[in-house]
Amino acid sequence: MAAWLKGVSGALASLALTFLGLTLITFLIGRVMPVDPVLAIVGDRAPKVVYDAMYRELGLDKPLIVQYLLYLGNILSGDFGVSIQTAKPVLDDLFRFFPATLELATLATLVGVVLGVPMGVWAAVNQGRWIDHVVRVVGLIGYSMPIFWLGMVALLIFYATLQWVPGPGRLDVFYEGLVPRVSGLLLVDAWLAGDDTVWYNALDHLLLPVAILGSFALAYIARMTRSFMLDQLRQEYVLTARVKGLPEWKVVWRHAFGNVLVQLITIIGLTYASLLEGSVLTETVFAWPGIGQYITAGLFKSDMNAVIGGTIVVGMCFVGINMLSDVLYKFVDPRAR
């Protein structure tokens, strides 16, 4: 019991320190950016009286440490400020935009795991053979191909030319607003509402962007799985298992693959986190209303509240995924318990 409490308290302390560090960095970035937050709100033609009043209202006349403490207090109370581009509270915008990115990144990660892990294992088992060369080439292309270029080419071929998939966006215009928003995930909300038409339309819109992001995840996961498996297949315990006459599938999947699961969990977690924050180009190409596009639009419009709020959310996603990976380690590897 004491060890459990010690572990929980250590995890909470680590989470608190990480959160403080993240908020401090975002606060300082917001202060050193060559953008005047007052002018972004009142405009460059506002009278000096209006400018000074807004300057004081934002607390910019206070010492820097006081500004940070006020900023931290606002965040802890859920107040990220008001977005200039939407004229709504940033927290409301984040609840509106983040589910789109979450849905896209989750499905892309699933594609990467379901296809990438078996491809990496098969390539390692068949090292030097044609399947190994195919997986390595696929991994090289998928990892080095520019996402924005691949997305535009895919739209040109499958949407504009072949018309196999619908256009950009999450739904066709005449389907928007037909299902009540519950989770913000269109597939989930349409399923809860029992509307098959909206569900299939949302799925059609997801196919192409998920395939583009999934190709990146697949390439990285397949390459790393192959590398981890090659290292394990050279170990003496694998040779011993084969000498004892164990079936090859058991040697590969139970013994060798079991020993790379911890490393794979780390890789999958990092891939998922990178897709959550790094799908800006994909969201831009496919007009996907996610948090990446929201942050990018905020940068162009000097909307620092939106940029900082989105950055904190993405940062906390990284922290949460890392903590989840630590928990999964203990289920996969008894030595970590």
Image (cartoon, rainbow, N blue to C red):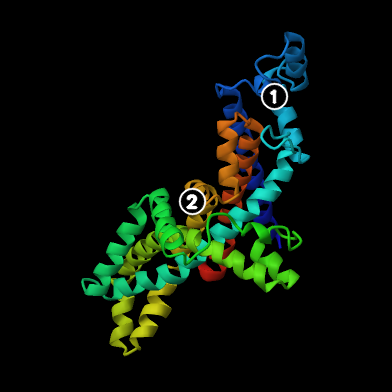
What is the quadrant of residue 43 in the picture? top right
Q: Which residue is mark 1?
A: 41
Q: Which residue is mark 2?
A: 282
301 w.r.t. 263: above or below: above
Looking at the image, which is closer to me, 213 or 61?
A: 213
The residue lying at 47 percent from left, 47 percent from top is: 281
The residue lying at 63 percent from left, 31 percent from top is: 303
Question: Gap in Å between the C-alphas at discs 2 and 1?
Answer: 30 Å
Q: Which quarter shows the N terminus?
A: bottom right
Q: Amino acid at mark 2?
A: Thr
157 w.r.t. 306: above or below: below
Image location (x, y in percent) of residue 61 = 72, 15
Looking at the image, which is closer to me, 246 or 312?
A: 312
Relative horizontal placement of residue 5, taking residue 126 as reference (left or right): right
Image location (x, y in percent) of residue 235 = 30, 71
Image location (x, y in percent) of residue 295 = 58, 40
* Mark 2: secondary structure: helix
Relative horizontal placement of residue 237, taking residue 94 as reference (left or right): left
